[in-house]
Amino acid sequence: MTDVKRFWPLLLGTHRYDKSLSTRDTGTGTLIEAPILAYLIETRHGRILYDVGCDHRKVDDPALRARFYETPEFAFGPPTVTPEQRMPARLAQLGLSPADVDCIVCGHLHFDHAGGLHEFAHAEVHVHECELAAAREPADSAYFGSDFLVDQGSHPVNWCVQAHEFSLCDGVHAIETPGHTAGHLSLLVRLPRGAPVLLCGDAADLVENLRDEVPPGLCWQERTDLALGSIRKLKKLAIHEGADLWPNHDMDFFRARNRFPLPWQ
């Protein structure tokens, strides 16, 4: 039984970077184009977003882009977010607005997953307590502190801090998968028809991470053991649930499943 009614992957931009940022100790010198994704889940109780993409303002404004993306400390470089890839535009294609989203699960709080929180001042944002602590340090250069202020910075995000795995409703369950970051969460979504979807988040950027059990290039405190443990946990859970594993930044994988605006249901 599941409360999930419909499910959409949302393409919110693209990012070109060295493959070694996704596959540790391999891929150096190879540029990949990665999708920046969020996932909209419509349930009987409301609408849930898993991740929210970048803050497009930091991409569009030259001064902000230079401040956040064009510095020696930031290895990724700026992403590309076209006007139609901004979160409000994607939701509008479905006849929705940010106000129609009831809650958010942030798999982690890096810029390409939590930057869009400024669109959702009204929404409850679920995050793991270890992740929020790491973001507030910050533990690495991919956390942007200003992403965690909404309404032009007038007040912080409406955090709902979680200490363990949790369910939002029947069919939507958050899975602890630390390694890439301290409190990373993946998401198991049981669809009304067909196999469940297990959204890896950045526990596995690419099919290769799962197939060959390669940890991400960026690991919290160099804890590759945690990252590999999370990959193996996801693979084991997928077998137990009969679920399809969805890596988060694999363009070929995404293109093979891109049905937007038609939902998976």
Image (cartoon, rainbow, N blue to C red):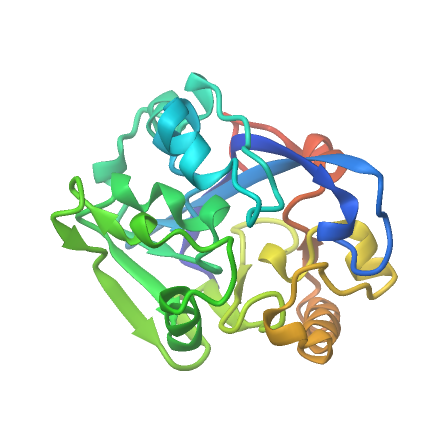
| Residue 86 position in % (x across, y down) | 40, 27
Which of 78 and 113 lies nearest the eye of the viewer?
A: 78
Q: Residue at x 38, y 37 (%)?
A: 55
Q: Residue at x 77, y 45 (%)?
A: 19
| Extreme-top residue of the structure | 83
The image shows residue 11, relative to residue 117, as above or below, that is above
Task: Classify residue 30 by image quadrant.
Answer: top right
Q: Is residue 87 visible?
A: no
Q: How many marks?
A: 0
Would residue 241 be found to the left or right of residue 27 on screen? left
| Residue 113 position in % (x across, y down) | 47, 48
Q: Is residue 133 visible?
A: yes
Q: Residue at x 42, y 57 (%)?
A: 106
Which of 64 and 50 lies nearest the eye of the viewer?
A: 64
| Extreme-front residue of the structure | 72
| Residue 203 position in % (x across, y down) | 64, 62
| Residue 255 position in % (x across, y down) | 70, 30
Would residue 247 be found to the left or right of residue 48 on screen? right
Would residue 158 be found to the left or right of residue 16 on screen? left
Task: Classify residue 31 by image quadrant.
Answer: top right
Which of 145 and 89 lies nearest the eye of the viewer?
A: 145
